[in-house]
Image: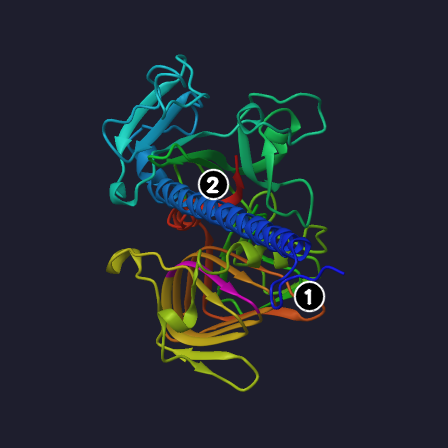
C-alpha cells in the first residue's frame, strides 16, 4: 500500500482549493466591477440631473426677468400691443446673437427666428446669473404649438387673456382673438416667453411661459350687487356715465340681481340709471383667486396695526390704502381675507374684500372695489364717501341688501380703473419645459 508524505496534502486536493480560490476571486472581482459601474452611473445621472436643474433654474430666472421688464419694453415700443412681428431678445452676454448663422455655426441660435421678424436685442440685468437668452413675442397658436379652439390647425391670430362679456359667471381664460371671440371678449395680449440656458459642457435647457396683464372684469354698472340695493336719503349720487372723456365706457348706475329701492333721484347711467332683477353675475371665487397676493398685498402688510376681531373681521380707522392722485398718486392694491369695517380712510388701487364691506364717515377711493359679500356705505361729515371707479359686490347667497346711506358719491371712471390694473405685475399663466 502506498501512502503520501505525512502532513502534506495530496495533489488533487491542492487543485480543488486553487480552483475554488480563483472562482471566489473572480466573483468578488465581478461584484466589484458591477458596484463600480453602478456607482459611476449614479454619479453621471446625478451630474446630469444637477446640470438640468441648474439650467432649469437659470432659464426660469431669465423668464422672470422678462416678466418684470415687459411693461418697460412695451413703453419703449420694442414690443407692441398691435404688431405681433416685434420680438425682443434679452441676452446675458453682448456677444450672444440668437439670430446669427444657424444651429451648426451658432450654439445660441434660435430655431424659431425668421428674417420677417422685427428684432431688438438688449442686455440682461442678470448677466451674472448665467443664462443665454430669453425671447418675448406675442403668443399665437402656431407659435405655441397647440390649438386653443376646436377648429383644426393652429392659427396665427394673437392669443388674449380675459373674459367672455356675454357669458355670465365667466372665468379668466385664454382665447384666440378672432371671429366672435374678438367681439364678445375683453382681455389683454398674451406674450410667449422662451428662455435658453446652456453651459460649457453643451447641456441646454429651454423653458416657455405664457404671461399677460391681468384684465379688469367686465363691468355693467357703477355699482353691481348680487344682493338687493336700498338707497336711503337724497345724499346718494351714483353716476354710470364715464368720467373718462377720451374713450368713455358708460355703464348703468345701479344693477342688482334683486330689487333696487329707495330714493333714486341721484342715480344716472347709460343705458339705464338702475337695472333691478338683472340676470348678470360674476364668478367671485375665480375673480378673488386671480387678485390674491402677490398681485395684491395683504392688508396686514399695508396697515400692520389693523385690528382683527375674533370672528375674522378687519376693523380700522384712518387707513391709507395707497396715495390719492392729489397726494402722491401711488396705487396700492389690497387684499382683505375677511369682512372689512373701516371709517375715515382713503386709498387708490384695487380693494378686494373676501367678505362684507362696511364703510362709515369719510372715505375717498380711486379704483375698483371687489367685495365677496354685501356693501354698506354710510357717508358722514361734509365730504362723505367718494369713489371714483366702480364697485362689484356679490355674496354667496344674494339674499340680503347692499345699503347706500348718508353722503355717498360713486362715479364710473374707466381710465382710473384701467390705471390700477396697469400697475399690477404681469401674471404667469403657464410654464413648461421644451
Examine the image and state in which quarter residue 244 appears. top left
> Whole-percent x and y of residue 226?
66, 60
Q: Looking at the image, can residue 215 be seen?
A: no
Viewer-nearest residue: 28 or 275: 28
Which label sits in the foreground, 2 or 1? Answer: 2
> Which class describes the residues within 10 Å of circle 2: few (<14), some (14-19), or many (20+)?
many
Q: Element type at marker 2?
A: strand
Q: Which residue is mark 2?
A: 211
Q: Residue tagged by mark 1?
A: 396
Q: Foreground residue, 168 or 3?
A: 3
Residue 157 vs residue 346: left or right?
right
Number of numbered discs visible in the structure rendering: 2
> Is residue 350 in view?
yes
The quarter of the picture where residue 124 lies is: top left
Name of the residue lying farthest toward the bottom: 310
State the residue lying farthest toward the top.
115
Q: Residue at x 47, y 44 (%)?
A: 44
66 vs 61, nearest the viewer:
61
Residue 185 lies, in percent from the top left, at: 60, 36
Residue 272 position within the rendered picture, expressed as x and y whole percent measured from the top left: 61, 47
Range drawn in magenta: 348-354
Query: Magenta stretch mostly in which secondary structure?
Result: strand
- Rendered position, 273 above or below 118: below
> In percent of the image, x 58 and y 28: which residue is there?
177
* Label of residue 55 in the image: none
Q: Is residue 180 above or below residue 394?
A: above
Amino acid at each position: 500500500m502506498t501512502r503520501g508524505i505525512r502532513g502534506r496534502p495530496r495533489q488533487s486536493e491542492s487543485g480543488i482549493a486553487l480552483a475554488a480560490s480563483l472562482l471566489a476571486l473572480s466573483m468578488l472581482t465581478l461584484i466589484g466591477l458591477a458596484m463600480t459601474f453602478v456607482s459611476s452611473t449614479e454619479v453621471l445621472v446625478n451630474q446630469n440631473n444637477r446640470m438640468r436643474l441648474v439650467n432649469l433654474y437659470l432659464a426660469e430666472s431669465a423668464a422672470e426677468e422678462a416678466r418684470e421688464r415687459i411693461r418697460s419694453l412695451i413703453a419703449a415700443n420694442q414690443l407692441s400691443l398691435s404688431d405681433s412681428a416685434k420680438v425682443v431678445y434679452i441676452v446675458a452676454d453682448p456677444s450672444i446673437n440668437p439670430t446669427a448663422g444657424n444651429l451648426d455655426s451658432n450654439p445660441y441660435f434660435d430655431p424659431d427666428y425668421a428674417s420677417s421678424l422685427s428684432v431688438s436685442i438688449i442686455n440682461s440685468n442678470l448677466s451674472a446669473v448665467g443664462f443665454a437668452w430669453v425671447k418675448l413675442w406675442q403668443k399665437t397658436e402656431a407659435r405655441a404649438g397647440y390649438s386653443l379652439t376646436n377648429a383644426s390647425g393652429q392659427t396665427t391670430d394673437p392669443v388674449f387673456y380675459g373674459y367672455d362679456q356675454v357669458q355670465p359667471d365667466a372665468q379668466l381664460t385664454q382665447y384666440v382673438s378672432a371671429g366672435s371671440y374678438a367681439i364678445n371678449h375683453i382681455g389683454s395680449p398674451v406674450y410667449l416667453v422662451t428662455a435658453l440656458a446652456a453651459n460649457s459642457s453643451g447641456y441646454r435647457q429651454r423653458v416657455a411661459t405664457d404671461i399677460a396683464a391681468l384684465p379688469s372684469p367686465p363691468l355693467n354698472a357703477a355699482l353691481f350687487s348680487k344682493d338687493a340695493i336700498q338707497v336711503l336719503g337724497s345724499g346718494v349720487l351714483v353716476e354710470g356715465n364715464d368720467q373718462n372723456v377720451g374713450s368713455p365706457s358708460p355703464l348703468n348706475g345701479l344693477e342688482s340681481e334683486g330689487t333696487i329701492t329707495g330714493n333714486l333721484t341721484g342715480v344716472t347711467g347709460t343705458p339705464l340709471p338702475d337695472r333691478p332683477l338683472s340676470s348678470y353675475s360674476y364668478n367671485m371665487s375665480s375673480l378673488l383667486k386671480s387678485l390674491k397676493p402677490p398681485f395684491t398685498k395683504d392688508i396686514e402688510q399695508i396697515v400692520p396695526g389693523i385690528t382683527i376681531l375674533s370672528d375674522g373681521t378687519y376693523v380700522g380707522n384712518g387707513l391709507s390704502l395707497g396715495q390719492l392722485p392729489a397726494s402722491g398718486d401711488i396705487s396700492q392694491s389690497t387684499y382683505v381675507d375677511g369682512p372689512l369695517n373701516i371709517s375715515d380712510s382713503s386709498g387708490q388701487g384695487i380693494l378686494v374684500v373676501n367678505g362684507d364691506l362696511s364703510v362709515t364717515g369719510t372715505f375717498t377711493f380711486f379704483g375698483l372695489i371687489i367685495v365677496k359679500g354685501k356693501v354698506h356705505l354710510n357717508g358722514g361729515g361734509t365730504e362723505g364717501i367718494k369713489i371714483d371707479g366702480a364697485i362689484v359686490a356679490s355674496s354667496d347667497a344674494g339674499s340680503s341688501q347692499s345699503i347706500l346711506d348718508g353722503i355717498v358719491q360713486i362715479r364710473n371712471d374707466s381710465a382710473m380703473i384701467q390705471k390700477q390694473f396697469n400697475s399690477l405685475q404681469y401674471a404667469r399663466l403657464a410654464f413648461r419645459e421644451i
